[in-house]
Image (spheres, grey):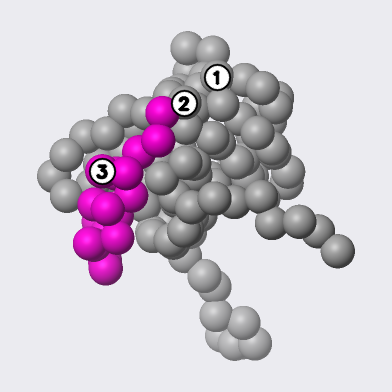
């Protein structure tokens, strides 16, 4: 049995997020978001736990730049704890049902299965 350590409600949105790490930029997909952190879906990107990173995203016509600490990473992506709680970002994301992806980000298209052409 595991103990739930989250203190804030989480929401899911389809949103591109830029990760700035070691003077490079990587694009990821937002998995879920809370006032205290974010889970970013990104395969084949290893950022060590304890690393400080910068995140950039666009929501409701506003550019957000947020610093965070990588608290866990696995093959699905990385969990980031914000250095400062982000209630305004969370509330903006809550208000939006359908989010337009960040320019330069294209969600992966699912391929139909079982079809033969």
Q: Residues within 10 Å of mark 3 (few under 14, many from 20)?
A: few
The answer to which of marks 1 and 2 sits earlier in the sequence is 1
Q: Position of residue 86 (x, y in %)?
A: 35, 38
Instruction: Kindly indicate whether the residue at mark 1 contacts the one at mark 3 (C-beta within 8 angstroms).
Output: no
Q: Is residue 1 left or right of residue 15?
A: right
Between marks 3 and 2, how big is the CA–CA gap? 14 Å
Indicate which disc residue 88 carries: 3
- Identity of the residue furthest to the top in this view: 23
Q: Which mark is residue 52?
A: 1
Instruction: Give left or right: position of 21 versus 59.
Output: right
Element type at marker 2? loop
Q: Let me know if residue 77 appears in the view.
A: yes
Q: Which residue is mark 2?
A: 83
SS for tag 1?
Answer: strand
Residue range in magenta is 84-101
Q: Quadrant of residue 63?
A: top left
In the displayed image of the protein, which residue is found farthest to the left?
A: 61
Callout 1 crowding tier (Cα within 10 Å): few <14, some 14–19, many ≥20: some
Asked if residue 90 is positioned above or below residue 115 in the image, the reply reads above
Above-or-below relation of 43 to 98:
above
Reading the chain from its start, which is encountered first: label 3 or label 2? 2
Spot occupied by residue 96 in the image (x, y as percentages of width and height)? 24, 62
Discs 1, 2 touching: Cβ within 8 Å: yes
Counting other residues with Cα less than 10 Å from the Cα at mark 2, is it few (<14), some (14-19), or many (20 or more)? some
In percent of the image, x 48 and y 52: which residue is there?
Answer: 8
């Amino acid at each position: 049995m595991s103990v739930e350590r989250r203190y804030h409600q989480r929401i899911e949105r389809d949103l591109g997020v830029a990760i700035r790490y070691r003077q490079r930029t990587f694009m990821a997909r937002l998995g879920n978001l809370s006032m205290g952190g974010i889970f970013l879906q990104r395969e084949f990107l290893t950022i060590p736990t304890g690393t400080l990173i910068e995140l950039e995203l666009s929501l409701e016509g506003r550019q957000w730049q947020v610093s965070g600490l990588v608290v866990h990473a696995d093959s699905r992506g990385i969990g980031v704890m914000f250095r400062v709680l982000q209630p305004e970002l969370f509330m903006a994301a809550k208000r939006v049902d359908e989010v337009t992806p960040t320019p330069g980000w294209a969600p992966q298209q699912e391929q139909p299965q079982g079809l033969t052409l």
